[in-house]
């Protein structure tokens, strides 16, 4: 069974500020339609009136912020609260690393889930009646 949430932690030094950022996060492994629509809304709102006119950097930042805004739930480190979910960060590498850690944790859970399904499938095949 796919876990509804996964935990991941970060320990990062800001490249610009030299501040240490560390803590534990909890993230949703799957999203509802409402969550997906909210992610798109946050993305478009972050980029302003003409999101398609935004440059690649702005688009990538908006994508990371909107992804994390709907995925992160429950456990959130104080630094993440203090920077309003990443929006007020001055260190690019912190946003990149938190996003990567979140994506990796979710991906690991999906790999575990698929492997579990493959084992169950193989067990069922072993139990199939054999032709006489």
Image: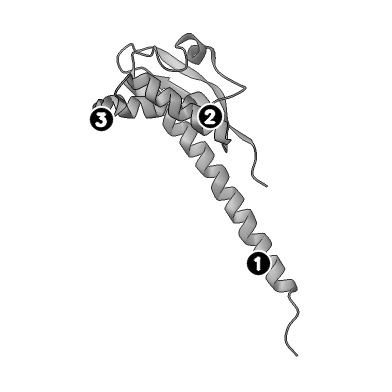
- Earlier-in-chain disc, 3 versus 1: 3
Q: Give residue 35's mark.
A: none
The residue that disc 3 covers is: 56
The residue that disc 1 covers is: 122
SS state under label 1: helix
The answer to whether residue 6 of the structure is visible from this angle is: yes
Residue found 70% across the figure and 66% down from its top: 123
Residue 60 at what x, y percent from top left?
32, 29
Give the Cα distance between marks 1 and 2: 32 Å
- Dividing the picture into quadrants, the one containing residue 5 is top right
Query: Is mark 2 in CB contact (under 8 Å) with mark 3?
Result: no
Q: Nearer the viewer, mark 3 or mark 1?
A: 3
Report crowding for label 3: few under 14, some 14 to 19, many 20 or more residues within 10 A (C-alpha).
few
Residue nearer the viewer, 113 or 41: 41
SS state under label 3: helix
Residue found 49% across the figure and 19% down from its top: 22
Query: Is mark 1 in CB contact (under 8 Å) with mark 2?
Result: no
The answer to whether residue 9 of the structure is visible from this angle is: no
Give the Cα distance between marks 3 and 1: 45 Å
Give the Cα distance between marks 2 and 3: 22 Å
Q: Nearer the viewer, mark 1 or mark 2?
A: 2
Q: Is residue 89 above or below residue 9?
A: above
Q: Is residue 30 above or below residue 53?
A: below
Residue nearer the viewer, 49 or 114: 49
- Dividing the picture into quadrants, the one containing residue 15 is top left
- Earlier-in-chain disc, 1 versus 2: 2
Q: Give residue 71's mark.
A: 2
Residue 3 at what x, y percent from top left?
65, 40
Residue 37 lies left or right of residue 57; in this view the side is right
Report crowding for label 1: few under 14, some 14 to 19, many 20 or more residues within 10 A (C-alpha).
few
């Amino acid at each position: 069974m796919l876990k509804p949430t996964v935990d991941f932690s970060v320990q990062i030094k800001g490249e610009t500020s030299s501040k240490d950022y560390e803590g534990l996060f909890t993230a949703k492994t799957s999203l509802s339609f409402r969550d997906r629509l909210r992610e798109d809304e946050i993305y478009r709102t972050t980029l302003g009136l003409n999101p398609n006119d935004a440059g690649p950097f702005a688009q990538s930042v908006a994508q990371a912020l909107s992804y994390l805004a709907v995925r992160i739930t429950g456990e959130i480190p104080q630094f993440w609260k203090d920077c309003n979910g990443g929006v007020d960060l001055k260190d690019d590498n912190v946003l990149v690393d938190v996003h990567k850690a979140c994506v990796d944790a979710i991906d690991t859970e999906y790999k575990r889930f698929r492997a579990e399904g493959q084992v169950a499938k193989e067990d069922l095949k072993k139990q199939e009646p054999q032709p006489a």
